[in-house]
Amino acid sequence: MLTRNILAPSSPWPVVSFDFRCQVSDKLLTRRYLNYGHDRGLKKHNSLRLRAGFWDSIKSGFLKNNTLQVIETPSEPQEDEEVLPQEFVLIEKTEPDGAVEQILFSSGGDVDVYDLEALCDKVGWPRRPLSKLAAALKNSYMVATLHSIRKSPGSEGNDQKKLIGMARATSDHAFNATIWDVLVDPSYQGQGLGKALVEKLIRALLQRDIGNITLFADSQVVEFYRNLGFEPDPEGIKGMFWYPKY
Amino acid sequence: MLLRGIISTPLPSSLRLKTPARHKTVAVSAHTSTDTKTTNYSISDQALESRGFILRRTIDDLNLDHLNTVFVAVGFPKRDPQKIKLALEHTESLLWIQYNKTQRPVAFARATGDGVFNAIIWDVVVDPSFQGIGLGKAVMERLLDELSSKGICNIALYSEPRVLGFYRPLGFVADPDGIRGMVYSRKQKKRK
């Protein structure tokens, strides 16, 4: 699987290594649950969930007509016991001009296919037909995204939302899942976002009782995935491709 | 043996690397996927039928307990039939061979994926009493045919070391260009 351009340092997540011009909000490690006004917000995982809003999201975009409610978590729950919320803020930082940027993780699969195409362009992937991209997303078991949401001071309700990362997994809903297409916007790389994306995706899959999570890694990113808990060729089992195009 | 290549128009698979893809120019058969009778399989549909083996492409009439028996016979762990049912219902393509005499499945293979770019083949099994006569190859050739006729360019699988020699003649390459198959292991995960 192509995970080119993800040169995340092998450091523990989350990595706080922002540009010196930005201040890191002390809310970095507090998980905030955001309800975006439609009922997808805080639903616990539903193993047969269909991404009903997917086609709507293509037409209407994401933060349109939404009320932002922030619900603070009481305390940091035990890593193993908590159910991963479908959407939450990974990182929040306040810039000197008062603007706030949030990196939002979502496993809800709300991807604007045009945004995805633009992101793929940014990382240098060859173009794929939009209809096929849309179909691939629709047929994926889980699509995890990272969006950057930027709120400028004084621009009430006019948030700038940008897709900056994505990873998706196909699955038979019972035993196996395979992760494909992991990508992070080059200007956001090096911050541990790729790691976070994949980690959260794995967590979400495990919570749905998918025991076998697999992927194919380019040689340059084998270490990246090893650090996330993946093992190459376990017990000598080899990944094979049918008439691969080199 | 099916040696069918794919000339694809720009439909890059996730395998595509930095250098522009050099398409593998292999002649593509003019046959459509529905034209199975004249496609060049190692064993034709008729040959299979005449020997009492029926090709099946749906889970109708597939007894999951019998399938589970075959899985266990080849060394897979025994799995919950309900989970197997769930997996098969969410499987994009599958093929199995039913032995007419016993009505039981004797060969099986399935593929999951996103239906456009990628597919992974799982659970390729042949009942040990029926191995060595070409049933595994028969199932694989047809499954690959079905997947490639959908335009899926990236077809992969995970092979145990002892059966690499089964997949290679079918056209599979291990670790092409250094790409490694990786599996998540909870025990393995490095914590902070």
Image (tube, rainbow, N blue to C red):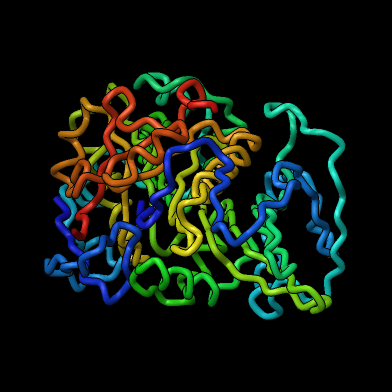
Query: Is A157 situated above or below A138?
Result: below
Q: Quadrant of residue A115?
A: bottom right
Taking the spot 71% from the left edge, 50% from the top edge, the residue there is A86
Residue B127 location, x and y as percent? 33, 26
Residue A37 location, x and y as percent? 85, 64
Query: Is B121 situated above or below A12?
Result: below
Tell me if I can see residue A173 in this picture.
Answer: no
Residue A107 location, x and y as percent? 64, 52
Tell me if I can see residue A146 in this picture.
Answer: yes
Q: How many marks?
A: 0
Residue B9 location, x and y as percent? 27, 76
Taking the spot 60% from the left edge, 34% from the top edge, the residue there is A206
Left or right of B76? Residue A146 is right
Q: Quadrant of residue A164?
A: bottom right
Taking the spot 18% from the left edge, 59% from the top edge, the residue there is A246
Left or right of A122? Residue A34 is right
Quarter of the image with the C terminus of chain B is top right
Taking the spot 77% from the left edge, 33% from the top edge, the residue there is A76
Task: Choose between A35 and A71: the one closer to the eye.
Answer: A71
Task: Choose between B33 and B150: the one closer to the eye.
Answer: B150
